Image (cartoon, coloured by chain):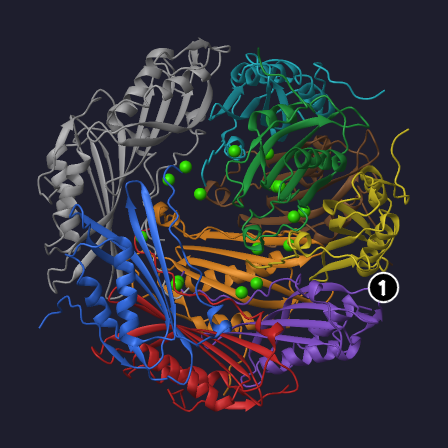
Chain colours: A yellow, B purple, C orange, D brown, E cyan, F green, G red, I blue
Amino acid sequence: MPSQPSKTLERFSNPHPERDYVVHMDLPEFTCLCPLTGQPDFAHFMLDFIPDQHNVELKSLKLYLWSFRDEGAFHEAMTNRIADNLIHLINPRYLRLLGRWYVRGGITTDILIEHRQAGWENPHLLSQLPPVHWAQHQPGY
Amino acid sequence: MPSQPSKTLERFSNPHPERDYVVHMDLPEFTCLCPLTGQPDFAHFMLDFIPDQHNVELKSLKLYLWSFRDEGAFHEAMTNRIADNLIHLINPRYLRLLGRWYVRGGITTDILIEHRQAGWENPHLLSQLPPVHWAQHQPGY
Amino acid sequence: MPSQPSKTLERFSNPHPERDYVVHMDLPEFTCLCPLTGQPDFAHFMLDFIPDQHNVELKSLKLYLWSFRDEGAFHEAMTNRIADNLIHLINPRYLRLLGRWYVRGGITTDILIEHRQAGWENPHLLSQLPPVHWAQHQPGY
Amino acid sequence: MPSQPSKTLERFSNPHPERDYVVHMDLPEFTCLCPLTGQPDFAHFMLDFIPDQHNVELKSLKLYLWSFRDEGAFHEAMTNRIADNLIHLINPRYLRLLGRWYVRGGITTDILIEHRQAGWENPHLLSQLPPVHWAQHQPGY
Amino acid sequence: MPSQPSKTLERFSNPHPERDYVVHMDLPEFTCLCPLTGQPDFAHFMLDFIPDQHNVELKSLKLYLWSFRDEGAFHEAMTNRIADNLIHLINPRYLRLLGRWYVRGGITTDILIEHRQAGWENPHLLSQLPPVHWAQHQPGY
Amino acid sequence: MPSQPSKTLERFSNPHPERDYVVHMDLPEFTCLCPLTGQPDFAHFMLDFIPDQHNVELKSLKLYLWSFRDEGAFHEAMTNRIADNLIHLINPRYLRLLGRWYVRGGITTDILIEHRQAGWENPHLLSQLPPVHWAQHQPGY
Amino acid sequence: MPSQPSKTLERFSNPHPERDYVVHMDLPEFTCLCPLTGQPDFAHFMLDFIPDQHNVELKSLKLYLWSFRDEGAFHEAMTNRIADNLIHLINPRYLRLLGRWYVRGGITTDILIEHRQAGWENPHLLSQLPPVHWAQHQPGY
Amino acid sequence: MPSQPSKTLERFSNPHPERDYVVHMDLPEFTCLCPLTGQPDFAHFMLDFIPDQHNVELKSLKLYLWSFRDEGAFHEAMTNRIADNLIHLINPRYLRLLGRWYVRGGITTDILIEHRQAGWENPHLLSQLPPVHWAQHQPGY
Amino acid sequence: MPSQPSKTLERFSNPHPERDYVVHMDLPEFTCLCPLTGQPDFAHFMLDFIPDQHNVELKSLKLYLWSFRDEGAFHEAMTNRIADNLIHLINPRYLRLLGRWYVRGGITTDILIEHRQAGWENPHLLSQLPPVHWAQHQPGY
Amino acid sequence: MPSQPSKTLERFSNPHPERDYVVHMDLPEFTCLCPLTGQPDFAHFMLDFIPDQHNVELKSLKLYLWSFRDEGAFHEAMTNRIADNLIHLINPRYLRLLGRWYVRGGITTDILIEHRQAGWENPHLLSQLPPVHWAQHQPGY
Ligand SMILES: [Ca+2]
Ligand SMILES: [Ca+2]
Ligand SMILES: [Ca+2]
Ligand SMILES: [Ca+2]
Ligand SMILES: [Ca+2]
Ligand SMILES: [Ca+2]
Ligand SMILES: [Ca+2]
Ligand SMILES: [Ca+2]
Ligand SMILES: [Ca+2]
Ligand SMILES: [Ca+2]
Ligand SMILES: [Ca+2]
Ligand SMILES: [Ca+2]
Ligand SMILES: [Ca+2]
Ligand SMILES: [Ca+2]
Ligand SMILES: [Ca+2]
Ligand SMILES: [Ca+2]
């Protein structure tokens, strides 16, 4: 049976919960619909997290992102919703999600979300996260 | 009915006020008039904010920027006015606005404004804001 | 009396018509209206020409570009119209105009126009024109 | 009535058929389905053409690209089909289409298509086309 | 049934044999064995071709490259063999294969192969092929 | 007797345990199998460590990495396992391992692991570690 | 009456004294005379300030810089004098002036001046000032 | 028996003499002695060739380069000698050797040698050779 | 009377001792003799200082640097001597001198010297000094 | 006996006159005196030649360049004189000399000289000479 889009994110047990480590995922393939006009919107997500007891399963993440293809969503709400679903799924020590949305009305919008578990900290590891690559719209260069 | 320029900025409820997150907008299309000579001025704005209870609605922001097309305004006053209107509209936890004004009289002027709610702070999130891209005027290169 | 927008381009006699030489002008400040929606459009023009008996007068060019501020125009027609007006004014040996129009509908459009006088050629000089800086739209980098 | 996806590309009369000029369009928002697995595919197109009697209308091009959102298509066939439809619509003097398809099976595929009218040539103008930005997949840098 | 490595390359009919167009594929995942020592070798291939009556099918190409995982092969012979198999399969108008082999004995080796059908030519299209990215070994930078 | 893959990492006595110093190793040649599909996976590892009483022996590290060629492993588990084996072998003062896994399902995944001995610190030396080169997936540039 | 050079800097009331914001000006057009030899000197100034009750008026600044065209001045004295005049005029919360003087006697000289009001501080805003672009003389590359 | 330096270059039969293809080798590890002072000299060689009936065997090339470790040689003579030995060994259709010698007496010397078989030509393939990376000595940046 | 080399550095009164400011000088033209062989040595100096009651006079500095043209000096001694002479002359609040000496014996040597007055400090100003551009010798790229 | 500056350039027999090959030398250490003021001048030379029956001997070239240390010379005359001396010495098939003189009077001067033997040509080899790196003086960036 071929793959189907699905809202069901899956997780697996973190094989090394005794240690803080970073998982960085680049997710350039996302599209949904504009809730006002019904026209397609596109975004490129970047995800970083430090797992606690669970990790997100890669294939389910792909199918999950696919599942928004025919849904309407505002930029802020969608970016927060994806972050919330991931946080609810794996309750990570730290999570950061950047949503870079393609230009609309001549305006480019990026959304950056950060979450951390109460009481958790690891400043040296956080200082080595990838720099955030914000959209850099250069009409006319 | 087609779109019209409008001073009325609109807002919507922040779908996730329980969390600090950054909205970054690149606004390269702005023009107004010089209050002294009546000639056109151009600017490229960059906006970052961390919403509290409200966000700015994208289309109304576009129409709002359009509404200055036939008005005269000094660089400092206009940049502050836009910041003030946004702050009044959404009362953000943090807001930063950069106005990069095109060269006049051989001089390039950039204006950087920062605002934060009394008592609010989130140093780690602020440290991940986009770097400010100041104008870099290179005559003769 | 302050400056006014004007369709009247002015010219002056080329002080050195005995020689082929290049004039390169960067014109980042242009705005007109979309003829379908009435909303503002923005473009950044780049102009190169090799004069024959006349050159375009700089201040009149500024007022000329200003004069389109409240007119509707399609990208292709406007770019060609500006090129035509300049060609009609100064009948240059060579002229190249690039119009880089800001993104609309998720699509960036650039228009490149070239004109040369019948019988004129100067391949070595043309090979040293500035490279054309086409728009390079990078959503999500 | 809101916009709808549509296979009907529209054209308008070239306002300046007496002249060769280049129209360059950057089209980063394209998605269709894999005809074998039904999963989403993404591509970023770049289009250059020199019109003859007609140009492609921008909004119809946006709706046309949207219309493939729920269709299955092979990379080579889809890229050629889009080129064919544009050629059939406007019969351009020259057209070049690059389709950069996102990585599948660890392999990145780009397709470059060129077309020109029998007998037409303009080597100097063609030499100023944008360089082709081929995909540059760098896993592990 | 899961995928298996396979020497059987598959092809499909070129949907547009009436036209010359380029297919560019980036193939960074290749490993075989050194025929002298039995130790693993790695290479990164880049492929460009202009199809005639057939194209190579993407998934079969992936499985084909996989099939060398446990075979011994010299760099020159392997690169030529892959080129030969592709040429035999699809008899392309033009094909270029670059094999960039990882450093061995302190020496980096790249192999570049070109093939074209007797009598075929299309200089303008060939001039737009991607530049060859030769290995650039920089010990000590 | 030719070299054989081997799980036995070897170590030698640190010739200068009286001093903190960094060893940086770039390990671009790694392949194993996907535990779900049996298909090949590729990764590029980067290792930094500050030895205590022992260092890892280079040739045994090569044979060790080779030993996973025919084993199935999840990205997170494999990256942690390699880090664990090295830590168990040499009990370093500090160790950092980055695993950059090639794109699967349109998603690029990097894993960053840090370990340090209880009580050890050397902030100035750590501040001079190589920057982490996270994967930077750019489909469509 | 045409513009004249003038030592009279003009100011206007800061429209938003309730807020700290940065004004950045790039002033690449400055020339005076060497007080020893009478030959022309050139400098490129960069100015950043955070206004208190007043701002400097742009046109008067242009005419002020012009007024030194026929005066002799040492580098250090001139750079300090301009800073002093601006500080006296607008009593800013913060001011930074960089004078980059063109090479003389084979030596390039830059002067950096900083001033702040007693008791004023805003570390976060200062941390976002443009980096200082010191002259970088590269004879022989 | 362990490897030994050796002047004996070995060759193997070109597996595909029916085709012109390029072999590019980067040879950064070379040292010999200065014939005047007996001090060590270092060079970085880059080799490109198009084989005819034979190719050079990689390991013998490594041992051959090693064999000069304790010999004195002038830059020009050594570079030509290596080229000659390779040409004599494999009689290639084309061969290019660049010797980049490290700075001596404040002077950097590079030697570029080209050879081709009488009557052989393949302009399109030659146009795709790697660009020559000449030494670029930058004392004082 | 023409200029002559001279060991006599001259100073002038700091026109603004009430303020800390940085003077940055780039001094690429220096040559002396090797004290062992009598052969020429070359260096490129970079100087930063914050004056107290005096500044160094530019022309005397040029003549001073010239005065070493026929003297022998070791790298470390010469760099320290220049720093000492400047410190003795103007007793600066802060001074930093970088001497970048051209390659000798295959080795590039840079010397960095720092001095500050007892009790003086200005961390914010020091944090804005130019980064030190150490020599980066790249034979063989 | 230690080295002495000397006008006597020495040559040795080209070990491979049967072949055209390029010798490229980077000569960053040159100083002479200004014939008008007696003050030091500095230059950075780059030399390329294709020898015929002789090559220039490296050490004598160093001593030759040294020999101008106390002589006055105009830029154009000196650059031509060095080229002439080399041409007279070795009668090369081709020679190119670039002299990049340090800034004087705010002006950077480079001199480029080319020579070739009557009747000699080798277009393919010449097309691979290093690009000329003209001085690029950027005061004020
Ligand atoms: Ca970006
Ligand atoms: Ca712009
Ligand atoms: Ca700028
Ligand atoms: Ca410049
Ligand atoms: Ca652009
Ligand atoms: Ca991108
Ligand atoms: Ca790309
Ligand atoms: Ca790689
Ligand atoms: Ca490479
Ligand atoms: Ca290095
Ligand atoms: Ca990467
Ligand atoms: Ca993209
Ligand atoms: Ca500079
Ligand atoms: Ca230099
Ligand atoms: Ca180099
Ligand atoms: Ca090197």
The spot of residue G91 in percent (x, y) is 51, 89
Residue at the image position 84 percent from the left and 69 percent from the top: B12
Say which quadrant the C terminus of chain I sits in. Answer: top left
- Residue I133 shown left or right of residue D1 in the figure: left
**Measured from the top left, where is residue C139 in percent x and y?**
67, 52
> On the image, which quarter does residue D76 sit in?
top right
Judge the density around disc 1: few (<14), some (14-19), many (≥20) Cα neighbours within 10 Å. some
Residue under the point 69% across and 21% down: E66
Residue that lies at the very extreme toward the front in this rendered image: F18
Q: Amino acid at mark 1?
A: His
Towards the viewer: A74 or F24: F24
Which residue is labeled 1 in the image?
B16
Q: Chain of mark 1?
A: B
Up-down relation of residue D110 to residue A90 (above or below): above
In the image, taking residue F30 as reference, residue I45 lies left or right, namely: left
Please determine whether, in this image, residue A80 is positioned above or below residue D102: below
Q: Position of residue D6 (x, y in %)?
A: 81, 46
Q: Quadrant of residue A108?
A: bottom right
The answer, for residue B3, to whether it is visible in the render is: no
As drawn, E54 above or below C25: above
